[in-house]
Image (cartoon, rainbow, N blue to C red):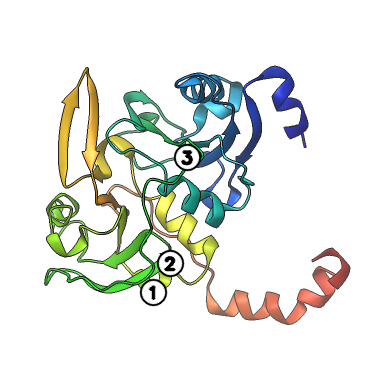
Amino acid sequence: LLSPLFPLVMSSVRQLKTFGEAGFHCLAAARVMDRYPREGFAAGLRILGEGQLSLTKFLILTDGDVDVEDFAMLWRHVLARVDWQKDLFVFANVSQDTLDYTGPSVNKGSKAMLMGLGRTPVRDLPEAFTGSLPDSLSRPQVFLPGTLVVQGPGYEADPDLARKIARWQGLSDWPVVVLVDDSQAATLSLQEFLWTFFTRFEPAADIHGAEQSVLRYHVGLKPPIVFDCRMKPWYTEVLEVDPATRQKVDARMHELLPQRWR
């Protein structure tokens, strides 16, 4: 509702979107100006310092001519341009939304900002999986170009699995690998993908690369970048609708919500 006002109060922000599919605070994206080197970074900090937007856990930035409300297009655009050595910023030991259970304790956790800037892509994104998986992984699904979703054992069975598979040579062609409990369920739709991806990882704890380096106090990663999005023991249980209630609501949906309002 207030999005047309964002450019007035944040002059470098041209468009801003928070994704309800990920609970709003878990994921936001912005189209920003990048007229001088790293201006986009300053715009990102401006967003993270603004009221309720400061609760954002993962912020994606681009200066490209792309509609940030279209996540599939945005994600593809950013992955084709991001430099993982310098364009991913993780802010550890900060406050986190009370409703986000991914951190070590209530209201504690981390945030991340991912930038995909520039007009020219720096890589082609794979769209089919032709590599190999370690025995611990199964059911690979390519949901979006450059993004491979794989299924592994539960977190308690192997807490360090994401770190280990980031070094697996058979995944080296992929910019991003998302490790989940059920890859088929996570890729049923864009809504399920966004929910599974962005509500089940904490940036400072659950992002891993094939290699990690520190230069000028900045942590750089080498792809594949693995996001550990498995359920963790301290997360709340998944809230599911019981079959009887679902059937009753579905049967009366035409009464409760007329077609013109759907």
| Residue at mark 2 to residue at mark 1: CA–CA distance | 10 Å
Assess disc 1: are there few (<14), some (14-19) or many (≥20) residues with their C-alpha within 10 Å of its C-alpha. some
Label 3: few (<14), some or many (≥20) within 10 Å?
A: few
| Residue at figure coordinates x 58%, y 21% from the top left | 50
Q: x and y percent of residue 32 in the render?
A: 58, 30
Q: Amino acid at mark 2?
A: Phe
In the rendered image, residue 124, in percent from the top left (x then y), is placed at 38, 56
Kind of residue indicated by mark 1: Gln
User: Label 1's element?
Assistant: helix
Label annotation for residue 184: 1
Quarter of the figure with residue 254: bottom right
Instruction: Give the mark, 2 or 1, whose residue is nearer the N terminus.
Output: 2
Q: Few, some or many C-alpha atoms within 10 Å of disc 2 (few <14, some 14-19, many ≥20)?
A: some
Residue on which disc 2 sits: 143
Q: For residue 142, which numbered disc appears in the image? A: none
Does residue 131 sit above or below 224 in this rendering? below
Taking the spot 47% from the left edge, 53% from the top edge, the residue there is: 76
Mark nearer the N terminus (2 vs 3) = 3
Side (left or right) of 122 relative to 97:
left
- Type of the residue with mark 3: Leu
Residue at figure coordinates x 51%, y 18% from the top left: 36
Could you tell me which quadrant the N terminus lies in? top right
Disc 2 and disc 1 in contact, CB within 8 angstroms: no
Mark 3 element type: loop
**CB under 8 Å between discs 2 and 3:** no
The one nearer the camera, 34 or 187, is 34
- Disc number for residue 99: 3
Q: Nearer the viewer, mark 2 or mark 3?
A: 2
| Image spot of residue 102 (x, y percent) | 35, 42
